[in-house]
Amino acid sequence: MFFDLSSTRLLEYLPKIILPAVVSTLQMLFFSMLFGFIIGTLVAILLVMTSPYGLKPNKKMYNTVSFIVNMIRSFPVIILIVAISPITRALVGTSIGEEAAIVPLTLAAFPVIARYMEASLQEVDTNVILAARSFGASNTQIMLKVLFPEALPSIVSGLTTTAILFLASTTLAGAVGAGGLGAVALTFGYQRFDDVMMYAIVVILFIMVLAIQGIGELIYRRVKK
């Protein structure tokens, strides 16, 4: 039988292990996306400002920042978690657990967010920028009052995609001691040959993806108006 319902401990573990793991996963996702968004926004502004077609072109600065962003993006999340463990330990006092996972997840998230935001901001019609300049708007005013409002729907869409992507990354973090649903699926499902437990975690993650997508689409429709 594919699912052995007689040997699973799903119902026993649901309140004391699975539900806390759901909360832990959501906390890792929320804080890594929040910090990634803050850093990614600042990096995206710098990229847009200094790009060859930006508001204040600076080729050397743009190439340097772009290289760093691309370099960090090239690392798989699970390798990044291990590679920066000394930095993580220095920042939060440990390299395992939920708080420790937020550090590498943030580091992995901000370049993705920065690139999505850069692309969204660069898609804004140049005529709108020229019109703002003709009214004497400064670069800061153009960035904050023209580019961001015009690009907001695209930014929301990119953040939704990133959140779904990094929900999967939190499960990878669980495989190296971060806790959350990934650790539960591995420890109590795969390693104990409890297929019901393992696939229940898959279903929970699927529901979380649908929820993130639904919230993202709702926000997108509101800012699109």
Image: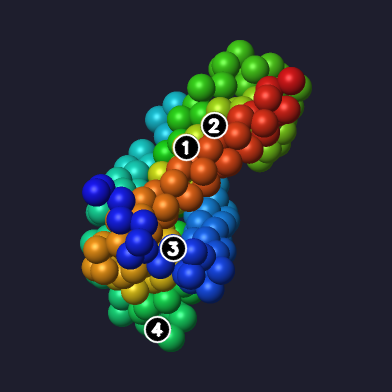
State the residue position of label 1: 161
Question: First in sequence: mark 4 or mark 2?
Answer: 4
Q: Nearer the viewer, residue 224 or 183?
A: 183
- Observer able to see residue 35: no
Residue type indicated by callout 4:
Thr
Judge whether 106 appears above or below 41 on screen.
Answer: below
Which secondary structure lies at badge 2?
helix
- Observer able to see residue 125: yes
Res. 94 mark: 4
State the residue position of label 3: 10
Question: First in sequence: mark 3 or mark 4?
Answer: 3
Alpha carbon distance from label 1 to label 2: 6 Å
State the residue position of label 2: 157
Q: Residue at x 30, y 62 (%)?
A: 194
Q: Position of residue 11 (x, y in %)?
A: 49, 64
Residue type indicated by callout 3:
Leu
